[in-house]
Image: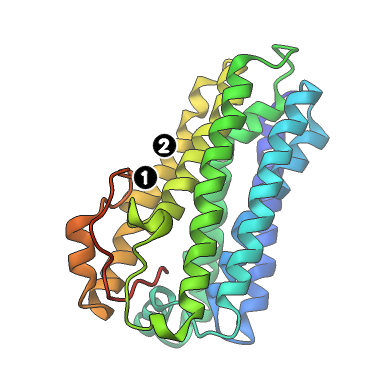
Amino acid sequence: MTLTWTVLGLNLASVSLLMLIGWLVSLRPSNVTIVDSFWGLGFVLIAWLTLAFTDGYTPRQWLVAGLVTVWGVRLSLHLTRRNHGKGEDPRYARWRRQSGPGFWWTSLFKVFLLQAVFLWLIALALQAGIAAATPARLTWLDVWGALVWLAGFYFESVADRQLRQFKADPANRGRVLSHGLWAYCRHPNYFGEAVLWWGLFLPALATGAWWAVLSPLLITAVLLKMTGVPLTERLLLEKRPGYREYMATTNAFIPRFTKKGAHHETAHRLG
C-alpha cells in the first residue's frame, strides 16, 4: 500500500488518540504542559505506522523512521526532564486563567487536539518519504537529507544541553547564556529543529513528493512566527531586563558565526 487517504487518516486518528491520552493524564495535576512530552512521540508513532502500512523502499523507510525516532525520543525525554517538578508553562497558565473553570475541557481542543493536527501536517514529509516505493535506491537527496538532519540535530541537542547546564548552576541566576551555540543566535535549539525538518523533507523530495515542502515551511513558520521565538521572547523581555541588550547584539534565528567581544551578564531562559 502507498500513501493513501486511508493511511493518512489512520495516522491522524492515532496521533489524536495519543494526545487524548495526554489530555487525560493532564487532568489530575491540572497541568497541560505534559503535552510537550507527547509532541516528539507523536512523530515517532506516525513514522512507524506509515512504515508498517505502506510498501515503500525499505532502506529509505528505515532511514527516515530511524532519524525521526532518534529526534522524537530525545526531544520527549528532554522536555519531560525540563518540565518535571515545575508548574504549568506560563503560556498555558495564562490560557487557563482566561478560560476559567472550563479550561479542563477546552484544553482538549485548544491544546491537545490542535497540536495533533499540527503534528500530523508537519509529519507529511516523513509520511511521503517512508511510503514511496520509487526510486528504489537511495539518491543524493537522501544522503543530503541525512546530513542536513544531522546538522540540525546537533544544533538542537547541544543547545538544549548547554542551556540545561547553564541553568543548573546557581551562579548563573540572573544572567544570559551567551556562549557556546548561544553566542551565534538567540534560539539555536529552534534553528536546529527547523534545519532537521528541512533534512527530513529531502528524502520525500527524492521520491517526487515536492508538495511535502509544507512540512518544513510549517515548522519554520511555527518556530519563527507563532509559538516559538515570539512567545518565548515576550516572556523573556518581561522577566529579564538585560535580555534586550542580548537581542541587540545577537541574531534571533539564523546563526551569525562571528567572534563576540564580550558575554552578556543577564539571564536567559527558554520556554
Q: Looking at the image, which is closer to me, 37 or 25? A: 37
Compared across the picture, whether 180 is left or right of 115 comes to left
Write down the residue under mark 1: 221
Q: Residue type at mark 1? A: Ala
Any mark on residue 10, and which?
none
Image height check: is 65 above or below 40? above
Residue beneath the point at 63% across and 23% down: 143
Residue at 71 percent of width and 51 percent of height: 14
Residue closer to the observer: 146 or 15: 146
- Quarter of the picture holding the C terminus: bottom left
Instruction: Specify whether 262 is left or right of 26.
Output: left
Residue toward you, 25 or 267:
267
**Which percent across, then down, holds residue 145?**
58, 28
Q: What is the image's colouring?
A: rainbow
Circle 2 residues within 10 Å: few <14, some 14–19, many ≥20: some
* Residue 129 seen by the camera: yes
Q: What residue is disc 2 on?
A: 217
Q: Residues within 10 Å of mark 1 (few under 14, many from 20)?
A: some
Whether pointer 2 and pointer 1 mark residues with C-beta atoms closer than 8 Å, the reply is yes
Q: Quadrant of the N terminus?
A: top right
Residue 144, image x, y percentages = 57, 24
Where does residue 103 sit, x and y in percent of width and height?
A: 47, 80
Q: Amino acid at mark 2?
A: Leu
Residue 207 locus on image (x, y percent): 62, 17
Q: Relative to the observer, which residue lies in front, 213 or 62?
A: 62
Residue shown at the point (47%, 29%) measured from the top left: 213
Against 210, residue 217 (above or below) is below
Compared to 141, does 186 lie above or below?
A: below
Could one spot residue 55 in this view of the protein? no
- In 3D space, how far apart are the residues under numbered discs 2 and 1 (Cα atoms)? 6 Å
Assign a secondary structure to mark 2: helix
Residue found 19% across the figure and 67% down from its top: 244
